[in-house]
């Protein structure tokens, strides 16, 4: 097992009816900014329920709606101004990954005096923590199980054709309320996105090369098998509480640092996926389903041992030689994605060969030239993956 440091301070408050804990979780004397997205939280009545909980202790509340999917720097700047002008001292994100990620950026940029007027620079530290001393404390009410943003300190922020990761030691949510019922209003396609994003987060930290991380491997395999068990049900039966509760908990646990501690991590699929979203607007998870299969096809030699382990332990494939097992495991994964309505080729989204050069140029521009668990995925190998995915 590799050395690691594991730190996660987020308080998870899970289950039906837990919204009523808001009054205990948000400081009573706080001036609160509620952040939300394009309107679903308003339409479903969730925003009213959140306001009612905060009003119990007479808090002053300001609202900021309109954070779009793939949160945009310019929109977030409007909220940063509000936090400064209104002297907000607690932010409550009500939404999915985009609202929570956007809120993390608002929380760290608003008090960063040294970056006032040049906040965009905060987007360009990559996987190095942004050098700020503090952030406005914030909590979340999760509405879409997918990204794990509710229990990690990462964000992905967009600015034109740049879609970039931002990390800070100060951007763990103070708490996250995870009520599976709040996610019942999601359209099927977003639930399928959630299943696939969670699946690929697990794969990025599991399917690399063996390092005797037995706990991490078994836990990752448990998440993958749970997703396979509940995937179709939670997409097709939106109000099946138990299936959805398992998706919610899997997505939080897949990217809160636990399964990735002490093991190599890949993230090639994500980095290529982010470029695809920035250039085409395709949903995050949809880029992943396409690129993960291509990643395995191109790097099956480098990932051979783990692909064999994945075939046997996750899919119970025990017949045939190693190559046949790997082929079957890749085919089974594709079948699973397809059965929850997820396409697995770029051409399914009418994205043609001209995307390849543009994505490769984006990877080069953003310094994503040594990707994967071994740092051996050069732009040329990314190109091969994209060509395989067409
Ligand atoms: O904007 P509204 O109107 O609220 O609608 C949203 C949005 O259109 C809708 N929605 C959310 N909850 C709903 C709902 N509709 C009905 N009922 C509900 N309960 O769903 C749409 C998608 O929402 P979004 O937040 O964009 O989806 P997701 O949670 O998949 O987040 C995707 C973003 O997270 C980033 C992605 O790159 C992308 O920008 N990621 C963040 C990560 C992190 N912070 O750790 C890791 C991930 O790998 C990912 O990169
Ligand atoms: Zn993801």
Image (cartoon, grey):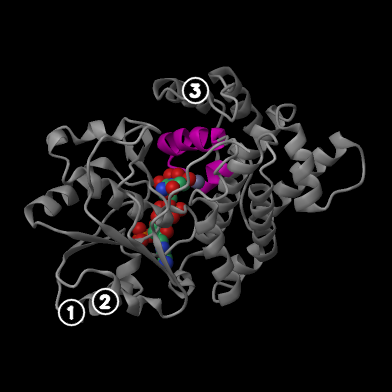
Mark nearer the viewer, 3 or 2: 2
Residue 8: in magenta span: no
Q: What is the crowding at mark 3: few (fewer than 14 residues within 10 Å), some, or many (at least 20)?
A: many
- Mark 2–mark 1 contact, CB under 8 Å? yes
Residue at mark 3 to residue at mark 2: CA–CA distance: 48 Å
Give 153 or 162, whichever is nearer the viewer.
153
Dot 1 corresponds to which residue? 57
Residue receiving disc 3: 360
> In this rendering, is residue 220 above or below 183?
above
Q: Secondary structure at mark 1?
A: loop
Q: Is residue 271 magenta?
A: yes
Residue 344 sits in which quadrant? top right
Q: Main secondary structure of the magenta part?
A: helix
Q: Residue at x 55, y 37 (%)?
A: 3
Give the residue at mark 2.
Answer: 23
Task: Tell me which corner region of the image, top left, top right, bottom left or bottom right, holds residue 160.
Answer: top left
Q: Quadrant of residue 40?
A: bottom left
Q: In screen coordinates, is 23 left or right of 215?
A: left
Region rendered in magenta: 267-288
């Amino acid at each position: 097992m590799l050395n690691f440091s594991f730190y996660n301070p987020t308080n998870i408050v899970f289950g039906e009816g837990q919204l009523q804990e808001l009054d205990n979780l948000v400081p009573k004397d706080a001036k609160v900014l509620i952040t939300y997205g394009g309107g679903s939280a308003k339409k479903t009545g969730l925003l009213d329920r959140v306001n009612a909980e905060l009003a119990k202790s007479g808090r002053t509340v300001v609202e900021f709606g309109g954070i779009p999917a793939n949160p945009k720097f310019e929109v977030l700047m409007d909220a940063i101004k509000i936090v400064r002008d209104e002297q907000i001292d607690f932010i409550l994100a009500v939404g999915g990954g985009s609202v929570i990620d956007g809120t993390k950026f608002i929380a760290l940029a608003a008090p960063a005096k040294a970056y006032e007027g040049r906040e965009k620079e905060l987007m360009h530290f990559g996987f190095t923590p942004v050098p700020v001393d503090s952030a406005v404390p914030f909590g979340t009410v999760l509405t879409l199980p997918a990204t794990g943003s509710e229990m990690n300190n990462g964000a992905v922020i967009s600015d034109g054709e740049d879609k970039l990761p931002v990390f800070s030691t100060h951007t763990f949510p103070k708490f996250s309320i995870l009520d599976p019922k709040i996610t019942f209003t999601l359209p099927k396609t977003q639930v399928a996105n959630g299943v696939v994003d969670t699946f690929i987060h697990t794969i990025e930290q599991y399917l690399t090369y063996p390092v005797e991380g037995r706990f991490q491997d078994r836990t990752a395999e448990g998440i993958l098998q749970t997703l396979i068990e509940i995937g179709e049900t939670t997409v097709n039966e939106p109000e099946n509480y138990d299936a959805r509760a398992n998706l919610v908990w899997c997505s939080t646990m897949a990217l809160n640092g636990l399964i990735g501690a002490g093991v190599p991590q890949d993230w090639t699929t994500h980095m290529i996926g982010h470029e695809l979203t920035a250039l085409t607007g395709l949903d995050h998870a949809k880029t992943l389903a396409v690129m993960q299969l291509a990643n395995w096809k191109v790097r099956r030699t480098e990932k051979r041992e783990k692909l064999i382990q994945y075939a046997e332990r996750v899919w119970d494939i025990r017949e045939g030689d190693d190559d046949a097992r790997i082929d079957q495991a890749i085919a089974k994964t594709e079948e699973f994605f397809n059965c929850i309505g997820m396409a697995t080729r770029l051409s399914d989204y009418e994205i043609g060969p001209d995307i390849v050069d543009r994505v490769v140029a984006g990877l080069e521009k953003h310094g994503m030239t040594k990707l994967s668990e071994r740092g051996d995925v050069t732009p040329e190998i990314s190109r091969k993956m994209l060509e395989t995915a067409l």
